[in-house]
Amino acid sequence: MKLDEIKISKAIIETYNKKLIDALDVDVAIVGGGPAGMVCGYYLARAGKKVALFERKLSVGGGMWGGGIMFNEIVVQEKARAILDELGVKTRLYEKGYYMADSIEAVSTICSKTVKAGVKIFNLLSAEDVMIRKNRICGLVLNWTAVEMAKLHVDPITMAAKFVVDATGHAAEVAHIVERKSGISLKTKTGKVMGEQSMWADVAEETIVKNSKEVAPGLYTCGMCANAVFGGPRMGPIFGGMLLSGRKVAGDLVKRL
């Protein structure tokens, strides 16, 4: 068969447009494709919810790819190991309570299982703003990351979601947008993004799950973003809390949806 470059281009444009149009009205929009965001999406989609995930970078996976200091191994604790087992990521016992996983296998497998569960992942798209109606976050304002990086004056598009999840990691980007632009007081001690504290893995792994909750009407925090918003410490290259956080938020949202 002779290949036609125009048909190839047409196939990509038509198929992507259809996928994007279908994602303009969903149950849950997740911003950030790190492990917490993807696990959250996986459990939501598995429960039959319509989910779109937006990642500004070319690749998903957040900081999990690099393990610790670019040593591509990650640590998970006993409580989180069951999630990796369910997803099919191989773990190895290091010593009691500490399990190792290859970070490349972990990211690629989590991503694959999330997509196969039904989550539509859009990379290279940034959430530059939120939609708010009656003091409730009800959607996102999206633009190409390349537009953002080049500082081009190009207007964005909008999409609707019953709930939005901020899984943007340390930056807590969506929560910062809501704080800066909406006039809504966040459900933190200060009413604002409190910022993360210095590393303390033992505490951080507990607080990240505790802090994974609704921070403003219609907006949930997930993953490292949760501790950044509510003032918990960072945890470093142990990823169990990230996985547990994603599952917790998904469970909370399934009940509300």
Image (spheres, helix red, strand yellow):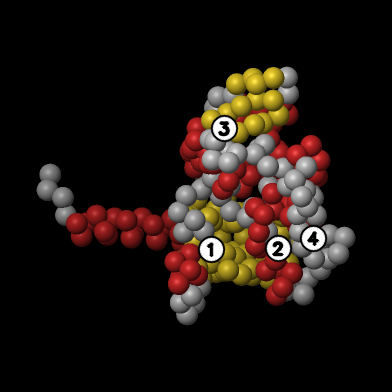
Please tell me the numbered disc located at residue 175.
Answer: 2
| Residue ID for mark 4 | 194
Disc on the earlier residue, 3 or 1: 3
Residue 212 pos. (x, y %): 75, 48
Which of the two marks, 3 or 4, is nearer to us in this view? 3
Please tell me the numbered disc located at residue 35.
Answer: none
Residue 111 pos. (x, y %): 51, 41
Label 3, residues with CA under 10 Å away: few <14, some 14-19, many ≥20: many
Disc on the earlier residue, 3 or 2: 3
Disc on the earlier residue, 3 or 4: 3
| Residue ID for mark 3 | 73
CB under 8 Å between callouts 3 and 4? Answer: no
What's the distance in space between the residues labelled 3 and 4, CA to CA?
A: 30 Å
- Secondary structure type for disc 1: strand
CB under 8 Å between callouts 4 and 1? Answer: no
Q: Looking at this view, is 141 or 179 the one in front? A: 179
Location of residue 91 by image quarter: top right
Disc on the earlier residue, 4 or 1: 1
Regarding residue 175, the answer to whether it shows in the image is yes
Which amino acid type is shown beneath numbered disc 1?
Answer: Ser
Residue 64 pos. (x, y %): 57, 41
Q: For the N terminus, give its image quadrant.
A: top left
114 to the left or right of 217: left
CB under 8 Å between callouts 4 and 2? Answer: no
**Residue for point 54% across, 56% down:** 54
